[in-house]
Amino acid sequence: MKKRNMNLRVVILGLIAGLTCNVETFTIGAPDAACKHMTPGHAHKEQTSESPAEIIVDVTEVEPGQTIDFKLKGKDGQKFMGFIIQVRDAKNLDNQVGSFIAGDEAKYMTCGKGIHNSLTHRGSTLKDEIASKWRAPSDFNGEVVFMFTNLIDYTTYWVRTPGPRLRVRQAESEVKTTTKPEETTTEYYTLADFVVDEIEQEIDKVLEETHIHNHDDKDDTTGGHTHNILDAITATKTKIGNLDIIEEVEERVLQEVDFPQPSLKTENELNLAAARPQDINVDDAFTPIYISSTTTLKTTTISQETTPDPLPFINGVAQHTSTQDPIYEGCNSTKACFGIPENCVASRRCRAVVAYKLDRVRYHFEMKALSEGYVSFGLSRDAKMGEDLTTNCIVQENGNVDIATGYNYGKSANKPPLGVTRKEDGIKERMQSGRKDGWIYCSWTRNISVYIENEEWNFEKDLYHVMLAVGDVYDNVIMFHSDKVVSAERMGLGQVGLITAKSRLYIILHGSFMIGAWIFASSLGIVFARYFKQTWTNTKVCGLDQWFVWHRSLMILVWCLNIVGLVLIILDVEGLSPTIYSNPHAIMGFVTVGLAFIQPFLALLRCSPTHRNRWIFNWVHWFIGNAAQILGVACIFFSTFLEKALLPAETIFLIIAWVAFHILTHVILSITSCVGENKAAKQGTMKYPPRGQYHPQRGPHQFPDYEELKRDHPGAGIRKFGLAAYTVACFIAAAFLIALVVLAPTRPSLVQIGILSSEHLI
């Protein structure tokens, strides 16, 4: 029995130590558990050199209750990512004193029994400096010292750097010595109180002995390992795993221990349009006045209700989340959020969104998406699809939503990991799942680490790209995603806040360049060469006819835009697009760029205009140019069906309308040219021969390419008017298409303002 109690004591000590001392530092700020030792939980060794940051205070002495300004600033322009700031009693460095008034870049931590007595960072952006205020305690007389921890990045940080010292001095008339009679009190302890008090010294010992060995360190004789409280708990449970009471004790401890939560700043903007003066002190509105270390204050938050914007509906289904959706609560303070389309979390208008946070010793996830198939949350080491760990919420044939672990085998197959059962897949609890009105919702918790495909996925120590995807399901099998977003950088799952998506710049530039090339530049270049050889004949540019200068310039532009656009999209997809087998856009695009590439080189090899085989070049040049343009426009048409384009389906109607106008313009100009050529032939003013084999001996007129003529063919006015109208139409069509690409996704907004119908037309 004695041995059983001793084992139970070891388990309780290990659990409480792990729960209270396994500190994580997040990009949204350190948790309150980091109070005492100010040490991030990044499993990396702290720096021993001089800190590249410093705290600047303009005073050396303060009165009790006085508020002073201070700054944490990088030295020599050095930026920093995160920080923890405290003010401690110089005689007892374990005691935090005073309270802070957080600035824009900081938020509160509440350590021990104090109120707002520590500061940490709000976000992961690099900072030159941060400014806040500190209020001296009203019941303290002595010297205090600023202490701070600062992080340059996830692996590089300096811990408990001492800063300026201040003297908190009371007036002599206020310093009194009083004697109080001894009082006898009876205190009652819960299980958590008893255990925490009993193991406090043990926790300090564990933390002091906790150290990191570099696996690359040749002097490391321990074999390279990490002392981690959670590992110790696991080892303890393994050693005495035959005790039935272990799980019961763990649950009791988790329930009874009071985990401190971040104390957030109440941020109410001043109403500058108020009808009456507002005499409230801004600092006092942000934080309660510090009274003593044992006083609990009630904080009142005044909020003004706002009416959310109406949701756009298509066929009765909301097209994005409500801005009041509970899933967004805490995205700026206690959890990480990521959504589709990219960076939609800031506006709270997402078609798919995932939110997660560290919940005690496990990670809690919740996810929802506009989908009738599946929504998947993935972790990738390289931001490429393949060898990724996923958690999938899948609509099954019976209509239920299942939460399952998946693994990306290559770029096209997401399957359950081989050799892993549902009990071994790392999901601790499948909490909620379901679907309603076209939306899927699910929530679950995961253990800190799991072994999948002979790899350890450690969410506490490792960095991953976050992936979110939605798509269809066929016969309970996940199909290739229809929409996807990937985080821009690798990050730890303890890093909290809004996650920035991978940039779409290459996709936007690729689409814009190709639209500009084939809808605008090539169309005008072809029109100049086909219909305007007998126009503006009395003026030249650098000794060349105007039609030729315009034609060559526009086609060189087409050539450049195609080459650059191809390079950009290859860089974005990092090889061949996985849609090459499902959409002809990629294959047709390669053929189009190939034809455009060889066209100017063929033009350089053309024979003279009077050569007897010149007609062969004319027809080959004509065929390649027209084939390239037709394929280019077809590529733009098929791109509207690609998930990366994010274009509304109705875009195809704009393309069809432009094609119809393009054909109509060519018909009108062709008729006008035929009439003009017939008249010119009768008048003997034909400058260029019709397309076909050249036979100078068969007619009275020679047709050199650059014979000077002083007047245009008949119908020049109509041709010029047609060119102006065609140029304006091509410009408007190209500009509108480019705007759809740059601003994508635009359909919900276009529906909301009434340009598009709420129901799909195709």
Image (cartoon, helix red, strand yellow):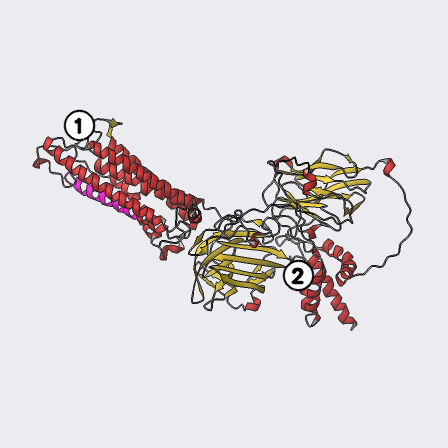
Where is residue 21 drawn, in percent x and y?
70, 55
Of the numbered discs 2 and 1, the one sitting upstream in the chain is 2
Foreground mark, 2 or 1, reads 1
Q: Quadrant of the C terminus?
A: bottom left
Residue 583's place in the image compared with 141, above or below, is below
Q: Is residue 591 visible?
A: yes
In reply to whether residue 625 is colored magenta, the answer given is yes
Pointer 1 residue: 709
Residue 39's place in the image compared with 711, above or below, is below
Q: Residue at 21% across / 42% down in the picture? A: 667
Answer with the quarter of the image where residue 622 lies: top left
Q: Amino acid at mark 2?
A: Asp
- In the depicted view, which residue is nearer to us: 647 or 707? 647
What secondary structure is marked by label 1? loop
Q: In terms of secondary structure, what is the magenta stretch mainly? A: helix
Q: Residue at 36% across / 57% down in the picture? A: 582
Query: Marks 2/1: CA distance?
Result: 91 Å
**Which of the labelled discs sits on residue 231, or is there none?**
2
